[in-house]
Image: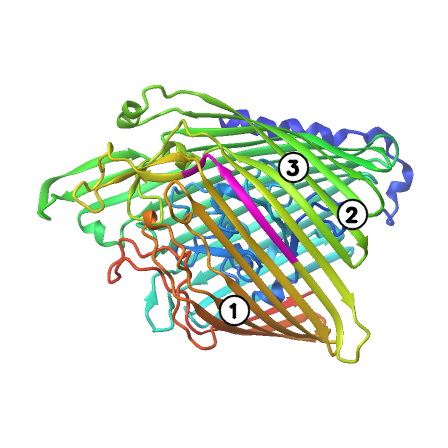
Amino acid sequence: MKLKHIAIICALFPIALLGQENKEKKNDTLTTKPIKLSTVIITGQTNTDPVMTSVKTEIAKKIVQPRNVADLFKDLNGFSLIKRGNYAIDPSFRASQYEQLNIQFDGGTKVMHACPNRMDPITTHVIPEEIEKIEVIKGPYSVRYGATFAGIINLVTQKTYLAEKGLHGSVNSGYESNGNSSVSMLKLQQVSSKFDITGNFGFRDFGNYKDGDETEIPSSFRSIDYGLKVGYDLSDNQRLQAGWRQSFGRDVLHAGLPMDTDEDNSSILSLDYRFTNSDGLLKEINAKSYYSYVDHIMSNTNRPSFRMTEAISTIDAATFGGKIEFKLIPSDKLTIYSGVDAFLVARDGLRTRLVKRNMMGEPLDNPMSFDDKVWQDSYINDYGVFTEGKYAISNKTLLTAGIRYDLIASNIQDPEADFNILYPDLGKRTENNISVTSSVKYIPTSNFMIEFAYGRGVRSANMIERYINHFTVGQDPYEYVGNPFLDAEVNNQFEIGIKGKWDIKHSFINTFKYGISTYYSIYENYIVPVIDPTLERKFMPNAQPQEVKRFVNTDESYKTGFEVLAKIGFLQDFSFKTELSYAYTQNKDLNESLPLTPPLVTRLDLGFEKERFWVNVNYTLTAKQEEIATSFREQETKGYTTLDIRLGVKPIESITIGVAALNVFDVTYNNHLNFSFKNQAGFERVPINDPGRNFSAFVQYRF
């Protein structure tokens, strides 16, 4: 299986030789212009970028001490965090999450979690200090970046080849008071006219934090990460780049999950190639291939259930992918992107249980051992073909339309006996999905833009929804059973967006920026787990709840909401920003909200920035959430407010110092999307509280 898919990576390599014979002698000079790889989605060109986009930059000034990449989404409008502890954190956007979001980095590389409880999402396998910006397409409004249901998130890492020639580097070190946590990172890079190499090494050691009531939350973890990136300009119009990353998580406590992570090891290999051509119909060829592997070990050694049953799971996930895209310009008004891609996921592993006591709590003379198949040796392969065109109706109006076809092949190769009895017709299954998008961008002036968009995003069921077999994998305590014959989810999303800017000639106010977008999604075949009275609890049969959930398709669900932005610049160096985000969801079949729907969030942000000094004050108001999914045992969540203050200074050009006071008023609160404590000594089944007051500091030296 692995050899088959690694061949995909090798197959893309010969493309790097394309056009090599046309290399000219002038390319040997030191003035060769750097070749930019197609690792970004949003280029800053308003008339060619996708519609309904947002970009987060200047990340270092906002997040002083990121635990992992998920922290970078904390203050991004429209986003919330799904928290199971201090490590396994997933971003949620507009009440969509997990595989509903197409999360990748550098234009296509992916890492899929091995743990069915998502102890190891993609946000844990990339160093946050590497991330230069976050790009977001807010819905299924592009078909170029893989199958997309509710939005595309691209984590863009720093570009070595754009740096100045010579040897560069940086050393970072940081400390966080709440949890006695520390972070360190070293980065080195060498850049020449044709060749560049970057290496980095990071270490994170986070302890258990305390909430506003001084209650200690089990949430400690350690991780070591390193990466190597090598690039070479084959000619003045060709670039080849290879990347290698590894991450090692150790002793990770997950307060909201039934087990903890003993080890989490991931490896990512990627290869990128770009060819550009100034003449003819074909302007660009962009190719990418990657392979990632996650080896995950989790156990209940430190949990109350260990007294009755020892449990350890050793599981793995392999992800393979690739893409070849051609950019053609038949005329001055028309640009066409067309290509093929692949996204292949395979998982396997066992949970070994040693039952030491009977149901009455009495020790067994001969403990009994059982092996449970977690993933049942399953795979899901997605092969896609796409075409997207941009047509300039006028110099002020751009029309974009695209169509995508995905062939999904899935199979379960080692099913448990009871799963085989439940589904006697198991075997390889193929699905055919069609996604389309159409949008109009109208730019009457350089300071105003209005966008209209429609997208039909299609998502086939993920591996949990298809093949999980009596495991507790949700935010509630039910056992879940998969359904291999689920129909694909469909999101018909409509959106209108307006962006504008006024340059004001006034002694007090300098600029005014604003933006608003509102959307409405009609869901078809929405996938949810519901109680199936024909199923009985398999593990710990006397535990509550006795009912078992099975994944099914529902007929009528929808989502609507909006985001608002208003920002003024005043007195040259000051700014004040207000952001609001709200999502409303409804599952008419169950007569309740969709699970994990965030409440209304309002952010007020006051900033002051000079070349060598900056201050940021952020006041966040989170409303109570009364719209809940009762079938998931969700509870209404109280509203709360938090105040964060950040300050940075560059005493000299090579040194940056930052300090922060987070949750200044030491508020005790929990976000509506936080999971509840599970199998945790000393805690009832209540939502996990977020950290109380926290002081943070970091220093960076560049050379």
User: Quarter of the image containing the C terminus?
Assistant: bottom right
Q: Which residues are magenta?
A: 516-527
- Any magenta on residue 261? no
| 304 sits left or right of 229 in the view | left
Q: Quadrant of residue 72?
A: bottom right
| Residue at the (11%, 48%) spot, across then down | 361
User: Which badge, 3 or 1, comes first in the chain's sequence?
Assistant: 3
Give residue 217's position: percent from left, percent from top.
34, 64
Q: Could you tell me how far apart the alpha carbons at marks 3 and 2 are, in whole angstroms?
A: 17 Å
Q: Amino acid at mark 1?
A: Thr
Q: Which residue is mark 1?
A: 620
Give residue 111's position: percent from left, percent from top.
52, 42
Q: Amino acid at mark 3?
A: Thr
Q: Which residue is mark 2?
A: 47
Q: Which mark is residue 437?
A: 3
Q: Amino acid at mark 2?
A: Asn
- SS type, badge 2: loop
**Is residue 415 at all visible to an observer of this figure?**
yes
- Any magenta on residue 520? yes
Q: Could you tell me how far apart the alpha carbons at marks 1 and 2 are, in whole angstroms?
A: 33 Å
User: Which badge, 3 or 2, comes first in the chain's sequence?
Assistant: 2
